[in-house]
Amino acid sequence: MAVQLLGPAQVRALAERHGVTPTKRLGQNFVIDANTIRRIVAAAGVRADDRVLEVGPGLGSLTLGLLEVADDVTVVELDPGLAGALPGTIAEQAPGRSVRVIRGDAAKVTAADWAEARDDRRTAGADDGPTAVVANLPYNVAVPIMLHLLETFPSIRRVLVMVQSEVADRVAAAPGSKIYGVPSVKAAWYGPWRLAGSVGKHVFWPAPNVTSGLLAGDIRPIADRPGGETLRLSTFRAVDAAFAQRRKTLRQSLAGLVDGPHHAEALLRSAGVDPGLRAERLGLDEFVAIGRALAAR
């Protein structure tokens, strides 16, 4: 039987049935428009053979849209009530389909959690973890969740998240932009990102106070990333330090990492980076060069 997506009346009825009152603390704004759901799934490029990980399924609107396309969907839900109610909703709206549910915080989910939800004794690695992440992310924790999932699951190849428009703009920003910063560089480590459209407030219940945007990432395999874990950590340390004092030159902002501005200048010159530049002028390659020089100290 065909999957039946949820409309406004069904979302509200489900919420009432399960005693759910959307809370700002958990960033709960449920999508109530089926066309928007199908648009998100299409933008995600989900295929039938994907292993999809959805974060924060809520009442199941997006989960059902994913099940129209993919057979293998696993969700991570923090709210125990919502996590417990979801399988019943799937059984009603998508007879014959099912989802695996990980109960917990997506910012802390592990490969072992993924394997346990799938009744798999192995720990998810590069070849057996999720291949796609699709989510309507709480605005205040969107970037930490994304980065955690990308670090935890090297199998991910595509990401499509709905986030606050300003968050999407920051992640997709290019060097030289005023909004280019830590999220831009750290996300770029894993692959290129692009804006995939905007989402109006009227498709949510309750309507949020901010506008939303779709953010898409094409994630590189481990072999195609700038380097291994040691280089990633040293590069991210440099990124954090550089943007913590973004109005200062790199010679000044990186001084705390290497015992003073003179050592910072020497480090930067060894990396082939002008010490007089500010962080916003550097792309991923320059930060990786700094990270490599820092790791070699």
Image (tube, grey):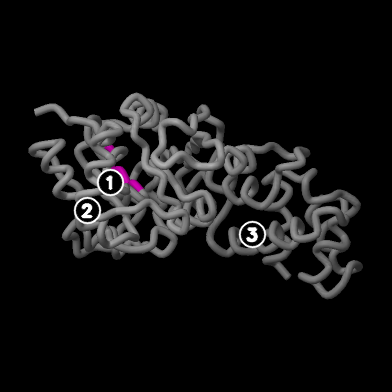
Residue under the point 11% across and 43% down: 91
User: Disc 2 and disc 3: Cα gap in Å?
Assistant: 42 Å
Residue pointed to by mark 2 = 18
Task: Name the kind of residue labelled 2 in the image.
Answer: His
Q: Which residues are magenta?
A: 50-54
User: Disc 3 and disc 1: Cα gap in Å?
Assistant: 36 Å
Q: Are marks 2 and 1 in contact (CB under 8 Å)?
A: yes
Task: Name the kind of residue labelled 1 in the image.
Answer: Leu
Percent x, y of residue 195: 55, 31
Q: Quadrant of the N terminus?
A: top left
Instruction: Out of 159 and 210, give the one closest to the viewer.
Output: 210
Q: Is residue 59 left or right of residue 96?
A: right
The furthest residue to the bottom = 259
Q: Are marks 3 and 1 in contact (CB under 8 Å)?
A: no
Q: Residues within 10 Å of mark 1 (few under 14, many from 20)?
A: many
Relative to residue 257, is residue 202 depicted above or below? above
Q: Nearer the viewer, mark 2 or mark 1?
A: 2
For the residue labelled by badge 3, is the local secondary structure a helix, a strand or a loop?
Answer: helix
Task: Name the kind of residue labelled 3 in the image.
Answer: Phe
Residue under the point 46% across and 39% down: 207
Q: Residues within 10 Å of mark 3 (few under 14, many from 20)?
A: some
Instruction: Out of 143 and 87, give the one closest to the viewer.
Output: 87
- The disc label shown at residue 236, or none: 3
Q: Nearer the viewer, mark 2 or mark 3?
A: 2
Task: Identify the mark nearer the N-term, 2 or 3.
Answer: 2
Residue pointed to by mark 1 = 59
Instruction: For residue 218, say whether it is visible.
Output: yes
